[in-house]
Each structure stands twice: as structure tokens, then as C-alpha cells.
Image (cartoon, rainbow, N blue to C red):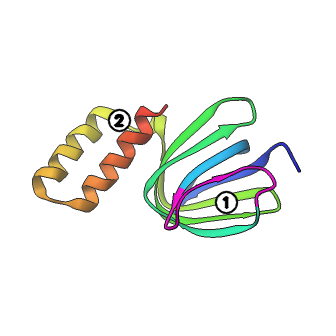
Amino acid sequence: MAAELHVELVAADRQVWSGEATLVVARTTSGDIGVMPGHQPLLGVLESGPVTIRTSDGGTVVAAVHGGFISFADNKLSLLAETAELSDEIDVQREERELERAKAAGDATAERRADVRLRAATAR
């Protein structure tokens, strides 16, 4: 069993992050899943939520991911997201305002997106 896995986090419009990791935690339609080197092959549907990547050098990368797919085989993990943002790309104050606007408007979709972005941004 290898000590690390190769991770590609890709959004519809760009490659968000690529590198070696020891653990990736993501939310799927079946629940939260942790993928480590040597994991059984899998294919799943991503739910909106933070994705946490423990890098091989001991660091942590957190991204807000909204929809898409997760695939793992041969120690290669692909996260193909509709949209994804790294935590350090997220403006916390803007997202707090957006969350309040979404709540006031009763827009559950916008509220969920703002909540996921805030959780990812504050996890950094």
C-alpha cells in the first residue's frame, strides 16, 4: 500500500488543486467519505460541502465544492466539481453578507452555497 495518493480537484472552469495527499474527506450523496492510499475503487456523486485534503507535507487544503463526482482507482483521486473554491480564495465578510441576504430572501440554494463557503473559509 502506498503512503500517498495523487489528487486532482477540478472545477468546470479550471484546475483548482493538484498534488499528493495522505487523506481526502468529502461529502457524497451516501455521506461523508475519507479516502486514503489503498482505498477500494469508488465512484460517487459529490454533495455541496467542504473538501479537506491532508497533503503529504503535513499541510491542509480546504475547498468549498458544489456538486460533481468523486472517483478513485490506482491511488489516483479525482474530484470533478461543478464549482470549487479554495478556502483562501473566499471572502468571509462577503459570504456572511450573502448568507444573510439568502436567508432574508428564503433562497435555500444560495443559503447552502454561502454556508459551505463560510465553513470552508473558516476551516483554513
Q: What element carries label 1?
A: strand
Q: Can residue 102 be seen in this view?
A: yes
- Measuring 81% from the left and 55% from the top, which residue is drawn there? 38
- Measuring 59% from the left and 69% from the top, which residue is drawn there? 44
Amino acid type of disc 1?
Answer: Ser
Q: Nearer the viewer, mark 2 or mark 1?
A: 1
> Closer to the N terminus: mark 2 or mark 1?
1
Within-10-Å neighbours for mark 2: few <14, some 14–19, many 20+: few
Q: Give the range drawn in magenta.
A: 27-39
Q: Residue 91 carries which label?
A: 2
Q: Would you say residue 28 sits in the magenta stretch?
A: yes
Q: Nearer the viewer, residue 56 or 35?
A: 35
Q: Is residue 95 left or right of residue 68?
A: left
Residue 66 falls in image quadrant: bottom left
Residue 107 falls in image quadrant: bottom left
Q: Which of 97 and 15 is in front in this view?
A: 97
What is the CA distance from the residue labelled 2 to the residue labelled 1?
Answer: 26 Å
Please state the horizontal and vertical placement of residue 77, each as a whole percent of the image.
Answer: 70, 57
Residue 78 falls in image quadrant: bottom right
Q: Are marks 2 and 1 in contact (CB under 8 Å)?
A: no
> Height in image: 104 above or below 122?
below
Q: In this view, does 43 lie to the left or right of 76?
A: left
- Measuring 33% from the left and 34% from the top, which residue is drawn there? 92
Q: Nearer the viewer, residue 38 or 93?
A: 38
Residue named by callout 1: 78
